[in-house]
Image (tube, rainbow, N blue to C red):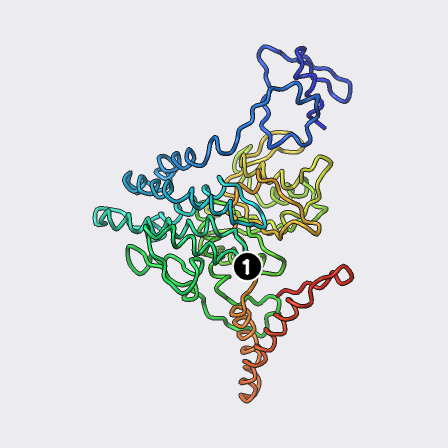
């Protein structure tokens, strides 16, 4: 591996010895090497013994320095209309509530794709920033009372807090997080009762300060098209609406999104439909890249570069006035190489870190503008790998739950009602019992016919 070529460079003679026998003398007084690594799992004793080691614990830095910088500089640059007093109020909300949320997750949280603490707080800042944009209805100016702004910011923070910290939890843990969030956020705002905090969106169209509105009120009607293939039909449900909104919210500020969840919950369908909806409204150009166990880093880079326009010699990006969104499906599928890394994922991580990558032939750096990643994956296992947190930390991570009985009835009723429209009217009353029987049969089969070693194909989903 390349690091073994560095061993002689780390010695006092500072000589680079290459595999082809070439020796290159470097200046030991002006050249030093600094490695920043996650762990030493694949480091050899020869390399470790030549380096001084400094371990930085997670709790040494914490999340506050980043949020302080964001509230003082990043938010002021992204939303110039936001006054200093409002930014101070928002930081105070972080200071009062984030530690309790992180402690609850450390004690009770279980995630398909684990998120590091700083990623959760970073996601929270991006969501708050997106909701504070004037284009989303947050009001600034002389005619706005500061108390109303603080009240509105409290609701914005509370809503973003629930999704940033609890959005990556499996569906069976969300009721417990709902109880915690309602108690923790009670001094900030009161959520409506009856459902969980994940069943409400923040609506700035009905007045200011905004109110909470159920996602069900935003679900559009379904128009049945008998010419469309069955597998291409997307019946709008509460889940499709809220995860489409979350995608739009994050993409508006250039934040990447990672959707996780068990196979068959509709991650890919929701993402593709949401990005197509943004094509006309927001100038988004979506491109889908499907990963498999055999996907290589070279293929991934070629696919991404083929969609870019050259702007200057070393700068590439989307066409003028557009934004590129690359949807990486099954992002955790690529096989590991000898030392445990996934080369396509590492290439995407380099893009997320540095906003570009190297030309493979001429070895010069390519900067990439106006491009964002959206990814989807199922939990590790069955050929899917665990991804490095150095990659996932760049994403707002959301877990898509399996369809509820209500969602399944909505989907099947909409399709069957449209199908029966061409039949005699006497057939239409049969829709409800057929749907009920289908949902009950699916529920019993998925609960009772579990996969076994002899029948590993017994996995049922919609």
State the image quarter where residue 100 is shown: top left
State the image quarter where residue 8 is shown: top right
Classify mark 1: helix, strand or loop.
Answer: loop
Comparing 451 with 244, the one in front is 451
Q: Position of residue 453 (x, y in %)?
A: 76, 59
Comparing 118 with 143, the one in front is 118
Comparing 298 with 234, the one in front is 234
Q: Quadrant of the C terminus?
A: bottom right
State the image quarter where residue 431 is shown: bottom right
Q: Is 246 drawn above or below residue 451 in the view shown?
A: above
Categorize mark 1 by other alpha carbons within 10 Å: few (<14), some (14-19), many (20+): some
Q: Position of residue 254 (x, y in %)?
A: 47, 44
Residue found 71% across the figure and 44% down from its top: 335
Residue 129 left/right relative to 398 = left
Residue found 51% across the figure and 34% down from its top: 58
Q: Quadrant of the N terminus?
A: top right
Q: Is 26 drawn above or below residue 247 in the view shown?
A: above
Q: Position of residue 359 (x, y in %)?
A: 63, 33
Q: Position of residue 333 (x, y in %)?
A: 67, 48
Q: Across the whole image, how many numbered discs are drawn on residues?
A: 1
Residue found 47% across the figure and 61% down from its top: 241
Q: Which residue is mark 1?
A: 401
Residue found 56% across the figure and 36% down from its top: 356
Residue 273 left/right relative to 147 = right
Q: Is 345 drawn above or below residue 50 in the view shown?
A: below
Q: Is 238 drawn above or below residue 338 in the view shown?
A: below
């Amino acid at each position: 591996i390349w690091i073994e070529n560095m061993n002689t460079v780390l010695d006092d003679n500072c000589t680079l010895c290459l595999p082809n026998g070439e020796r290159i003398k470097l200046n030991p007084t002006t050249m030093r090497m600094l490695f920043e690594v996650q762990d030493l799992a694949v480091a050899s004793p020869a390399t470790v013994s030549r380096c001084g080691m400094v371990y930085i614990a997670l709790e040494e830095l914490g999340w506050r320095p980043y949020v302080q910088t964001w509230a003082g500089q990043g938010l002021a640059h992204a939303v110039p209309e936001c006054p200093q007093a409002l930014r101070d109020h928002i930081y105070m909300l972080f200071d009062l509530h984030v530690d309790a949320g992180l402690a609850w997750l450390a004690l009770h949280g279980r995630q398909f794709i684990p998120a590091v603490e700083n990623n959760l707080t970073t996601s929270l800042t991006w969501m708050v920033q997106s909701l504070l944009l004037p284009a989303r209805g947050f009001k600034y100016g002389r005619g706005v009372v500061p108390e109303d702004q603080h009240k509105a910011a409290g609701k914005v923070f509370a809503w973003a807090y629930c999704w940033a910290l609890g959005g990556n939890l499996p569906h069976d843990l969300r009721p417990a997080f709902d109880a915690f969030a309602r108690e923790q956020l009670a001094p900030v705002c009161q959520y409506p009762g009856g459902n969980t905090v994940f069943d409400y969106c923040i609506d700035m169209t009905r007045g200011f300060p905004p109110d909470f509105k159920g996602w069900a009120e935003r679900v559009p009607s379904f128009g049945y098209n008998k010419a469309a293939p069955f597998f291409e039909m997307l019946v709008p449900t509460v889940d499709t609406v809220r995860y489409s909104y979350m995608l739009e919210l994050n993409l508006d500020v250039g934040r990447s999104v990672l959707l996780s969840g068990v196979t068959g919950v509709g991650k890919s369908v929701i993402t593709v439909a949401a990005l197509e909806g943004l094509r006309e409204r927001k100038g988004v150009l979506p491109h889908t890249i499907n990963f498999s166990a055999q996907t290589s880093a070279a293929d991934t880079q070629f696919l991404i570069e083929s969609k870019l326009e050259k702007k200057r010699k070393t700068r590439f990006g989307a066409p003028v006035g557009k934004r590129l969104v690359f949807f990486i499906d099954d992002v955790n599928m690529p096989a590991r190489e000898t030392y445990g890394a996934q080369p396509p994922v590492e290439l995407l991580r380099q893009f997320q870190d540095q906003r570009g990558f190297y030309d493979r032939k001429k070895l010069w750096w390519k900067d990439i503008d106006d491009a964002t990643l959206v990814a989807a994956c199922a939990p590790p296992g069955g050929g899917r790998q665990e991804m490095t947190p150095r990659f996932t930390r760049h994403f707002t991570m959301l877990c898509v739950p399996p369809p509820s009985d209500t969602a399944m009835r909505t989907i099947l009723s909409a399709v069957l009602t449209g199908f029966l429209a061409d039949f005699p009217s006497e057939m239409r009353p049969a829709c409800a019992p057929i749907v009920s029987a289908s949902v009950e049969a699916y529920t019993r089969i998925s609960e009772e016919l579990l996969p076994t070693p002899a029948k590993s194909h017994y996995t049922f989903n919609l």
